[in-house]
Amino acid sequence: MMLKREKGVSVTIYTYDKSKVLEMDLATYNEQYPDSPMRVLPSYGMHDRFLFIDDTAYHFGASLKDLGKNTFFFTQEEFTLEEVLKESQKIQDAKINQEGKAF
């Protein structure tokens, strides 16, 4: 899917846990496909998976790594990427405020 996009189409992965493996895979991908780079940015408190294509949002409740192994549902949603990221930031801010009060 990532390789079939046209030049100039951006891909951003938002994740809570940016592992060393993901960083290495991302660096390898970006080196191999310099005209179609991907970037990874932080997201907080989001368990479910979302796919945004242009202005259309899709919600995946299950892990994409298991796609096709069992019954799998996804739905088209009415929210925007900006709304999801705003909620993610609220979760992170609340966590920081909670941790700050604990000391």
Image (tube, rainbow, N blue to C red):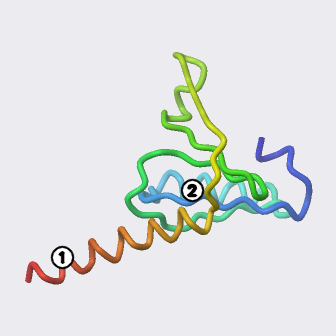
Q: In this view, does 70 lie to the left or right of 51?
A: left
Residue found at x 56% / y 66%: 83
Q: Mark 2 points at which residue?
A: 24
Residue found at x 13% / y 82%: 101
**Residue at disc 2, secondary structure:** helix
Residue 82 location (% of width, % of height) = 61, 68
Residue found at x 36% / y 68%: 91
**Depth-wise, is mark 2 or mark 1 nearer the camera?**
1
**Residue at disc 1, secondary structure:** helix
Q: Which mark is residue 2?
A: none
Q: Is residue 60 above or below residue 7?
A: above
In front of the other: 27 or 98: 98
Q: Name the residue under label 1.
A: 99
Residue 65 location (% of width, % of height) = 54, 32
Quadrant in the rendering for residue 71: top right
- What amino acid type should be assigned to the residue bearing mark 2? Met
In front of the other: 83 or 98: 83
Quadrant in the rendering for residue 73: top right
Residue 15 location (% of width, % of height) = 49, 58
